[in-house]
Amino acid sequence: MSLVCAISNEVPEHPCVSPVSSQVFERRLIEKYIAENGTDPMNGQPLSEEQLVDIKVSHPIRPKAPSATSIPAILKSLQDEWDAVMLHSFTLRQQLQTTRQELSHALYQHDAACRVIARLTKEVTAAREALATLKPQAGLVAPQAVPASQPAAAVKRFSFIYINDKATILTTERKKRGKTVPEELVRAEDLSKYRQVGLHSASIPGILALDLCPSDTNKVLTGGADKNVVVFDKSEEQIVATLKGHTKKVTSVIYHPSQSVVFSASPDNTIRVWSVAGGNCVQVVRAHEAGVTGLSLHATGDYLLSSSEDQYWAFSDIQTGRVLTKVTDESAGCALTCAQFHPDGLIFGTGTADSQIKIWDLKERTNVANFPGHSGPVTSIAFSENGYYLATGAQDSSLKLWDLRKLKNFKTITLDNNYEVKSLVFDQSGTYLAVGGSDIRVYICKQWSEVLNFTDHTGLVTGVAFGENAQFLTSAGMDRSLKFYSL
């Protein structure tokens, strides 16, 4: 519907209505009429400009002029609109073509950049591995030469690809094992039935380190204050080998999982590799300039991690005795007290004399996480087989459990006053945690409740270890005794 002015009979541009006659007018015309006559043009009643009421309408459509309504005029109008549409379409096609060319060029550049980045990344990785193979990091002690008598083929090339592949396999196997608890695993209620079944006295003044052979848990390895490393057969109840060579007490020992080889560390600054069958030292690793405080074997079985009072941790090849890398946290400037590999071998933890637990990335050789909370020197750390939990003990009479996924302490077990934690170990299934120190305590994981407590040792317990499927528990202490507990 369109409004029509009562004076001009045309569509008004500014319509208004007269309240006197209720007629619509073009404001311009009605104002002139009122100025001349002062009345409404339709009924002659008095009318002023203030009485006019504007009408709000959307843009009024003015009718075409009569001359534009002829057929030729309509055809011309249609032709003009068609021409405008065609010109607009041509412009859009040109813009589309330009945009396509620009997009194609950008995609080509992106693809080329990705290929260059991939190539450079591959070259950087290869260069890093070559650098790690050829020499230790700048500023570190030089590696020992490989003995000329040793065949070159026997030297396994240090490669992170090898380590990563091994970690992938271990992670997969661990996740499979984690879904079910071994049927042979001793139940928590049966642990309380443990009793002492054997006693092996060591030389005076005491045993400082303990480990079991993973492939044959009857083989027990100990290190003593008498500077000796002893291999004891539990089933035969006799000493298999006594290994002598350290010039100071032996504080850490490890049994190789698949070879008749054991490792030991001492405050005499050396790490020794021993042949059990030959009863002799086959390699001396000189990775540190101060006493070695911690030792851990990589999951591949080819490399050793060590920590020292010289504030460095070192990564060494057991076949050659060569130090592959040696790193310190320059911002801390504190002695390391212990070290332990994660089950997958890609990360490891170290404890410090100033109560810090540090997690390191082996490949990048960087400190990736810190766990503060203890108030004394850290004495022992242990990773659970499930790969998620880390247990730590320190000279503050407390045991702390850490979640590696959330990087936080989720449980603190406060021990008796003046309790000294010397050893921590999870069983292979990750079900139990044993603590050795002022006595022996066993906790069931997840509930973290105590299920066992042995007080048979008359001195500090310096080492504890579980047999296969927790069928037995062995411990060693400063009272010179090696004890076995089983059902």
Image (cartoon, grey):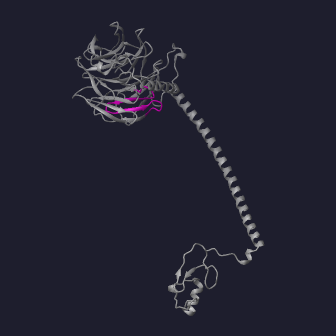
Of residue 464 and residue 35, the one placed in the foreground of this image is 35
Of residue 214 and residue 74, the one placed in the foreground of this image is 74
Is residue 279 visible in the rendered structure shown here?
Answer: yes
Return the residue found at the far right.
72
Look at the image and say whether residue 360 sits in the magenta stretch: yes
| Quarter of the image where the N terminus is located | bottom right
Q: Is residue 99 above or below residue 212?
A: below
Occupied quadrant, residue 8: bottom right
Of residue 445 and residue 199, the one placed in the foreground of this image is 445
Which region is colored magenta? Answer: 341-366
Image x and y of residue 353, in percent: 31, 30
Q: Number of callouts in the render? A: 0
Q: Is residue 155 left or right of residue 373?
A: right
Q: Is residue 125 left or right of residue 176?
A: right
The residue lying at 31 percent from left, 25 percent from top is 444
The residue lying at 72 percent from left, 78 percent from top is 66
Image x and y of residue 148, in percent: 52, 14
Return the residue found at the far bottom.
37
Of residue 103 and residue 310, the one placed in the foreground of this image is 103
Image x and y of residue 268, in percent: 35, 20
Image x and y of residue 52, in percent: 52, 84
| Quarter of the image where the C terminus is located | top left
Is residue 308 visible in the rendered structure shown here?
Answer: no
The residue lying at 39 percent from left, 29 percent from top is 349
Look at the image and say whether residue 11 sits in the magenta stretch: no
